[in-house]
């Protein structure tokens, strides 16, 4: 199944947390810090939202940092995704 976001919405998938610290210590599941880093899976067409034209600035495949409490989590075909507005994306990681 494919997700096609509307307007200025973006579908992202969380990037898994690191299992080791920088010094090489392996972390148990409960100690892993859950980052707000995700990969863009699909991007809406943009257009007019609330009377303002929105140009989409992220592309499929981009790694992004998003707001902590942004978007809606959905589960499709056993995979977890987040659908959020482009304005909830804080930065693109290059």
Image (cartoon, rainbow, N blue to C red):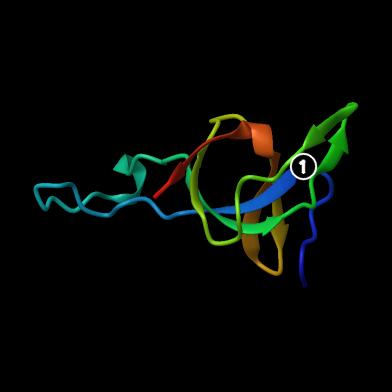
- Give the residue at the far right of this rendering: 51
Which type of secondary structure does the marked residue at label 1 adopt?
Answer: loop
Q: What residue appears at the point 80 percent right and 52 percent down from the top-left corner?
A: 45
Q: Is residue 3 left or right of residue 34?
A: right
Between 22 and 59, the one lying in front of the other is 59
Relative to 30, is 4 above or below?
Answer: below
Q: Is residue 85 above or below residue 24?
A: above
In front: 42, or 19? 42
Q: Residue at x 73, y 42 (%)?
A: 55
Q: Check the image and name the residue furthest to the bottom.
A: 1
**Relative to residue 67, is residue 22 depicted above or below?**
below
Whole-percent x, y for residue 61 in the image: 54, 61
Q: Is residue 6 left or right of residue 28?
A: right
**How many tags in the picture?**
1
Quarter holding residue 70: top right
The x, y position of residue 94, in whole percent, is 39, 50
Residue 48: % across, % down:
87, 37
- Tell me where residue 34 appears, x and y as whole percent: 41, 41
Residue annotated with mark 1: 8
Residue plotted at (61% across, 52% down): 12
Label 1 Cα crowd, 10 Å radius (few <14 / some 14-19 / many 20+):
many
Q: Nearer the viewer, residue 44 or 12?
A: 44
| Quarter of the picture holding the N terminus | bottom right
Q: Locate residue 43 relative to residue 13 in the image: left or right.
A: right
Q: Point out the residue furthest to the left here.
A: 23
Decide which of 84, 56 is in the foreground and name it. Answer: 56
């Amino acid at each position: 199944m494919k997700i096609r976001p509307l307007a200025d919405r973006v579908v992202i998938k969380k990037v898994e947390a690191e299992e080791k610290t920088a010094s090489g210590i392996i972390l148990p599941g409960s100690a892993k810090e859950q980052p707000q880093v995700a990969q863009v899976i699909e991007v809406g067409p943009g257009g007019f939202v609330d009377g303002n034209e929105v140009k989409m600035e992220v592309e499929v495949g981009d790694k992004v940092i998003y707001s902590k409490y942004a978007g809606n989590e959905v589960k499709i075909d056993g995979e977890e995704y987040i659908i959020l507005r482009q304005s909830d994306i804080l930065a693109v990681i290059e």
